[in-house]
Image (tube, rainbow, N blue to C red):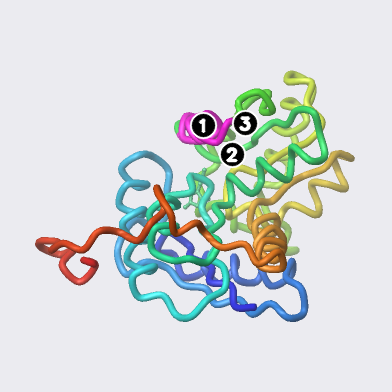
Amino acid sequence: MNLLLINPNTTQRMTDALATAARAAAAPGTCITACQPSFGPASIEGFFDETIAAAGVAEQMRHAPAHDAVLIACFGDPGLDAAREATRAPVLGIAEAAFHAASFVSTGFSVVTTMTRTCVIAEHLLHKYGFERRCRGVHGTDIPVLALEHCDAQGQPLCLPQIEAAARAALAQDRSGAIVLGCAGMAGLCAALQVRLGVPVIDGVSAAVKLAEALVGLKLTTSAVGDYALPLPKPYAGWAQPLSW
Ligand code: 2AL
């Protein structure tokens, strides 16, 4: 199957890293194509960033290559509903995928994310998706998204001890049984954190890949009836003109 991964931010290094993480999770028959918007923020760390990034996701969906499933690889799931209107293939956001996966393996989970100001974005999603009773806390580390990739001379991510400490504190404070990583850029930390913490650690990128494969295997498509019907045809003005239906 062909899986289209959209990194909603415009940092090519991060798009490449997300493609690598997705390929590591994918089954042998899954082919991952990764892309990013032609405009927008280098990283998504607030509402303004997210609004522009959602338009970038819509742009990529408008010109999307053939695909069997789509993965939106930012923890705010920007543009998820718009993407579902634009294709009949299943579309997974990494936050929604991670919340589902964490709920299969724990009675309650904690989210550990990047900037504290983005906690409210995760909290809004938990309410929107109906997971507020499964999530016991959302915790910021104030690590900027693009600092997640900074490594020491041995190639070890510099942020790992800080994220491990935040996760340990969250597990104790929230009485939770699993950790959801609250940023796509944390995908490469997942395996090490799971060993160190001794609890399930969920990276939304790999969770979304596996859930996308399951949905495609079940021959489930995004419903063409009702809310997710194709956008109604109408002119779009200004820079959005090429995106009109
Ligand atoms: C994110 C993410 O996953 N990618 C990005 O640019 N910002 N979300 C986050 N909470 O840091």
Task: Count neighbours of disc 3 (C-alpha within 10 A) and say few if under 14, some if 14 to 19, many if 20 or more.
Answer: some
Which residue is depicted at the point 39% across and 67% down? 61
Q: Quadrant of the C terminus?
A: bottom left
Mark 2–mark 1 Cα distance, whole angstroms, equals 7 Å
* Callout 2 amino acid: Thr
> Nearer the N terminus, badge 2 or badge 1?
2
Compared across the picture, whether 130 is left or right of 232 comes to: right
Whether the magenta-drawn stretch holds residue 49 is answered as no
Place residue 174 in its image quadrant. top right
Determine whether the beta carbon of the residue marked 2 sits less than 8 angstroms from the nearest atom of ligand 1. yes
Whether the magenta-drawn stretch holds residue 121 is answered as yes
Numbered badge on residue 206: none
Please name the predominant secondary structure of the magenta segment in the image: helix
Q: Which residue is mark 3?
A: 131
> Nearer the N terminus, badge 1 or badge 3?
1
Task: Count neighbours of disc 1 (C-alpha within 10 A) and say few if under 14, some if 14 to 19, many if 20 or more.
Answer: many
Q: Position of residue 231 (x, y in %)?
A: 30, 59
Front residue of 193 and 175: 175
Numbered badge on residue 113: 2
Q: Which residue is mark 1?
A: 119
**Which region is colored magenta?**
118-130
Asked if the residues shown at circle 2 and circle 3 are in contact, with their CB atoms under 8 angstroms apart, the answer is no
Mark 1 or 3: in front is 3
Asked if the residues shown at circle 2 and circle 1 are in contact, with their CB atoms under 8 angstroms apart, the answer is yes
Mark 1–mark 3 Cα distance, whole angstroms, equals 15 Å
Asked if the residues shown at circle 1 and circle 3 are in contact, with their CB atoms under 8 angstroms apart, the answer is no
Compared across the picture, whether 170 is left or right of 138 comes to: right
